[in-house]
Image (cartoon, coloured by chain):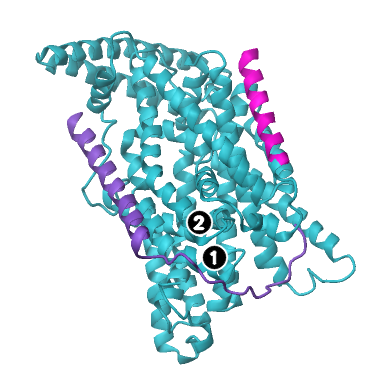
Amino acid sequence: MRPLDLAVLVTTLTGFVLYGLWRSRGTRDMAGYLVAGRDMPWPMVALSVMATQASAVTFLATPGQGYVGGLSFVQFYFGLPVAMVVLCATLVPLYQRLRVRTAYEYLERRFDGRTRSLATFLFLMQRGLAAGITLYAPGLVLSVILGLDVRVTCALLGLLVLGTTALGGARAVAHTQALQFTIIIGAMVLAFVLALRALPQGLGADDALAVAGHLGKLQAVDTHFDPRGRYNLWAGLVGGFFLQFSYFGTDQSQVGRYLSARSSRESRLGLLFNGLFKVPMQAFILLLGVLVFVTYQFAPSPVFFDPAGAARVRAGTHAAEWDAIERTHAAMGIQKRAALTDWLDARRRGAGVSEPEARLKQAQAGDKAARDSAVALLKAAGPATNTNDTNYVFLHFVLTRMPLGVVGLVLAAIFAASMNSTSSEVHALTSTTMVDVLERLPGVMRRGQGGDQRELLWTRLANVFWVAFAVLFSQIAGRSGSLVETVNQMGSLFYGTILGLFVTAFLVRRAGGPAVFFAALLAEAAVLACWKLDLVFWLWFNVVGCVLTVAFAALLAHLVPAWRAKPEQLPQRPLRP
Amino acid sequence: MTRGEPNEPHEPVSDPAPPFGGRWSVLYALVLLVLVAVIAALQWLTRHYS
């Protein structure tokens, strides 16, 4: 890394840390730590909510997703604006009215302590796993830049996150996220402009889109319904709605952000702002990945973007084969460039494109064979070798094609996003562990002499535990393909059931604690069966978990009178909190 | 984190901004309209360049 880039990176990150420390002054009580004294204005809530969701995974893996799969991943976000509207009309006013500190406190009032414990457990599981993934993304960046093992860099980052979560609070998180998110968006816009300028001479935006479209990267909307298909309009709208509604409505890492707003109005405006801008923002980042793809159709690229994997094969007994594969890949690249140039020329002139198309297909087939051979060699190099390089694509582009200084800025943005998101997650995990678990255990939070020190000790232990959990899981996450998919897939295993608990609270007035508790257990078992048996695409897990929890709760409450709700537990104004 | 009363009951507060009606309905409709417009634009992109 060049000195100027390193200086920009270090200066920007130091600025973030100092700004966070300055903003966190004055946080001295629990309300300040958990909900920032409930005094945040809506623009701060909006940026904090968007920054919490948009971790480094978004800015590192999403362009990679665009490179590999084109724009189709944008459909995953189609349910988000709808979820924001429903959330603003239902749960947000309810939480603000009841002055809860975590979402799960509400469940104890409506059902019982056991149901609250179940929701807490499911949240801690899925968010703990997700924290590992969000930690892995910058660990990857550091390992490539510094040449260190990714396990070492993840552990280093875990220590940094531990420091920030121990010092900060909801106020520091919101303010630093607002600043960082602004810089992140600026860096992405700059990267987009520079990616456009990196296109070969004479190739305009329309030509780039034509090439991307011809190579299948602009298939943004698929209206064909297929429950096992990957991304389509219906999975995005219905499955995406359930996922996003559960994430924003019941995941403490998000609930904690808008509970810090000074009123229900400010919370709702912040969430609606997110609903307006999220889909266009994701489409823009995916399009950046598509632009990188087009650039590499006209410029040399590595056969495998993860330099550590390639280095491992080169150091082994298959070095000669790897060199031969790289030569084939380079030769196919030259053929592709020639065929694409002729195809574009024919398209501009309105002439026949069949001949360059045939040459292009031939070169693509040759390149795919070279790539498959490379992956086979990577597998042969050892079971621990990563064979998926989606997350390295954008990083390679930034490091090799961005001008001096911009590399440092883009890397700082990626770091900022991840550190902030992981800090936010660890803050939520620690808060939930304290409020929903340890406070409820008899004898742990004893009042009286030494009580404050005991609570501080437990908070720090919970902090250390969740950072250690994230670091450990990050090692597994790295081998599971695209990070942006993995983080959502893991969440989808639990989100539907958690959401089902809240929906039952509103819609099934008869259901009491035992009914909804056992309904949730049955629904979670069904979701895990869907996952293990590969019955439906993972976005539908959210629908299955939610619908089954509600249906089982209604059925059990109907069959077992003792499991029905007591009158004092019922919401007075269902759906109109 | 400093001490909090374990599971202390919080007094419900009244919400001066009702969740439906008036400007809120307009805002909700605007968010959904933007979604429809973005999907339509992406669909046009899909068809135009395929």
- Identify the mark at residue A295; answer none if there is no mark: none
Label 2 lies in what chain? A
Is A21 inside the magenta-drawn segment?
Answer: yes
In the figure, is residue A282 to the left or right of A400? Answer: left
Could you say which is closer to the camera, residue B34 or residue A166?
A: B34
Q: Residue at x 43, y 58 (%)?
A: A245
Q: Which residues are magenta?
A: A1-22
Is B18 inside the magenta-drawn segment?
Answer: no
Label 1 lies in what chain? A
Counting the numbered discs, the total is: 2
Which residue type does callout 2 highlight? Ser
Percent of width and height locating residue A453: 85, 60
- Identify the mark at residue A96; answer none if there is no mark: 1
The answer to which quarter of the image holds residue A280 is: top left
Which residue type does callout 1 highlight? Gln
Disc 2 target residue: A267
Disc 1 element: helix
- The colour applied to the residues of chain A in this rendering is cyan
User: Are the residues tagged 1 and 2 within 8 Å (C-beta)?
Assistant: yes
Could you say which is closer to the camera, residue A498 or residue A552?
A: A498
Residue A82 visible? The answer is yes
Percent of width and height locating residue A379: 49, 31
Disc 2 element: helix
Q: Residue at x 18, y 18 (%)?
A: A357
Sort mark 2 into few (<14), some (14-19) or many (20+) by Cα contacts within 10 Å.
many
- The colour applied to the residues of chain B in this rendering is purple
Percent of width and height locating residue A575: 40, 72
Image quarter of the C terminus of chain A: bottom left
Task: Find the distance from the CA under tag 1 to the CA under tag 2.
Answer: 9 Å
